[in-house]
């Protein structure tokens, strides 16, 4: 697969809506594409993967993964988000940057690497339901994939090496009051009861600061209370987005919050923990040799739900994801293919760091 063939495939992917849990058509497209190149893809739900042809049980295994689902288009698109448009060397379209560029670049790199003998097996996975952390995404097929020594997760990082990633915990909070008539001095206003807790989330700082990921970041991102202008609300609901560094587990952060606020708390999940790869890992050292920078990423990915050592790296920029007029530079795809190949070709994995 040449870089131009990869770009053409991405255009065809953009033209097929593939929202989370609705990826059937793009999964069909990719299944047919793999078959065209002489592979027999395996499929479970809308997850598709292929294995290198010269598979050996004596070799470690490297996984290349990028997700095929997208969010729904935001308002403000100047063009049809499902119509691939190239302008000024940018390919516009929903999912072009997040993460269609990684999907096709990883596929092209896999096909190139599988032509020569490597010291490791390769699996190329095109996974579903990443955007909503759905139960039928990558975590559904962990056992099907077997032992993985190293995973490269394709996300828009500017083809720099994200060696750590913040975890995510969302907490729904409920402050209680007592209903009453707004014209009389009665009732307990649940909004006022919530204000000290909301201020606590705004001002509290966790002590441990990561050199890669910085502070734990807590942000109140939604609030709902009241139905009538003349009724004191007896309930105020608000939600909090919490990005956790590797110094704390999600459970530890939750317990700290519990000790400091009065509202009832309902965590949606503890499963999206922070992740990191040892800085002396062979693949990180290869990235450094290639002149790639290393950094900590504030956004979550499939790394949060897999049990393997992993590195996040892919073409495009995170700032373009989930935005109107999403795009990726054509040259970012070309560079992505070349860089994936340079990172992995003849790489000798130290399994003790896995």
Image: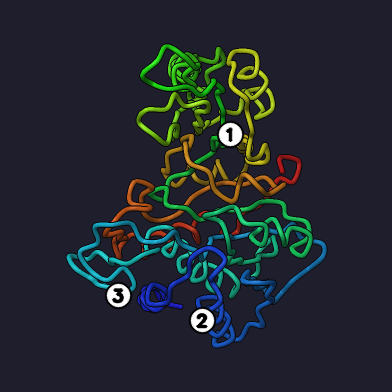
Q: Which residue is mark 2?
A: 29
Q: Which mark is residue 83?
A: 3
Badge 1 or badge 3: first in the primary sequence? 3
Task: Measuring from the top left, give residue 118's x and y in whole percent.
Answer: 65, 64
Give the spatial CA distance, label 1 vs label 2. 37 Å
Q: Is residue 240 visible?
A: no
Residues packed near mark 1 inside 10 Å, few (<14), some (14 to 19) or many (20 plus): few
Give the spatial CA distance, label 3 vs label 2. 16 Å
Residues packed near mark 2 inside 10 Å, few (<14), some (14 to 19) or many (20 plus): some
Q: Is residue 40 visible?
A: yes
- The reply to whether callout 1 and callout 3 are in contact (CB within 8 Å) is no
Q: Nearer the viewer, residue 283 or 312?
A: 312
Task: Measuring from the top left, give residue 18's x and y in whole percent.
Answer: 48, 70
Give the residue displayed 46% in from the left and 78% down from the top. Answer: 1
Q: Which mark is residue 279?
A: 1
Q: Is residue 47 left or right of residue 10?
A: right
Q: Quadrant of residue 92?
A: bottom left
Give the residue displayed 62% in from the left and 28% down from the top. Answer: 265
Badge 3 or badge 2: first in the primary sequence? 2
């Amino acid at each position: 697969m040449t870089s131009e063939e990869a770009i053409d495939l991405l255009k065809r992917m953009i033209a097929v809506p593939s929202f989370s849990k609705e990826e059937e058509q793009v999964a069909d497209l990719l299944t047919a594409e793999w078959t065209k190149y002489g592979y027999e893809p395996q499929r479970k739900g809308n997850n598709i993967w292929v294995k290198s042809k010269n598979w050996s049980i004596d070799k470690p295994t490297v996984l290349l993964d990028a997700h095929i689902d997208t969010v729904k288009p935001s308002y403000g698109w100047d063009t049809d988000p499902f119509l691939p448009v190239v302008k000024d060397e940018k390919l516009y379209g929903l999912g072009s940057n997040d993460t269609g560029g990684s999907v096709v670049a990883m596929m092209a790199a896999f096909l190139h690497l599988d032509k020569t003998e490597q010291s490791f097996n390769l699996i190329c996975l095109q996974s579903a339901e990443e955007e909503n952390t759905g139960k039928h995404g990558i975590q559904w097929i962990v056992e099907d994939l077997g032992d993985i020594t190293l995973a490269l997760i394709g996300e828009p990082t500017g083809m720099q090496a994200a060696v750590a990633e913040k975890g995510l915990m969302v907490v729904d909070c409920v402050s209680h009051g007592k209903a009453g008539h707004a014209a009389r001095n009665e009732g307990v206003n649940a909004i006022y009861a919530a204000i000290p807790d909301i201020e606590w989330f705004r001002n509290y700082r966790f002590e441990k600061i990561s050199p890669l990921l910085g502070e734990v970041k807590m942000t109140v991102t939604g609030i709902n209370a009241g139905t009538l202008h003349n009724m004191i609300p007896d309930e105020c609901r608000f939600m909090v987005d919490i990005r956790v560094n590797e110094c704390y587990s999600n459970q530890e952060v939750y317990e700290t919050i519990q000790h400091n606020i009065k509202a009832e708390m309902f965590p949606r999940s503890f499963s999206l923990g922070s992740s990191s790869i040892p800085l002396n890992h062979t693949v990180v050292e290869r990235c450094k040799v290639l002149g790639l920078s290393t950094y900590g990423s504030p956004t979550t990915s499939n790394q949060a739900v897999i049990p393997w050592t992993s590195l996040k790296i892919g073409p495009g920029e995170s700032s373009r994801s989930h935005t109107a007029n999403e795009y990726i530079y054509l040259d970012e795809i070309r560079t992505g293919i070349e860089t994936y190949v340079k990172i992995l070709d003849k790489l000798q994995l130290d399994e003790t760091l896995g």
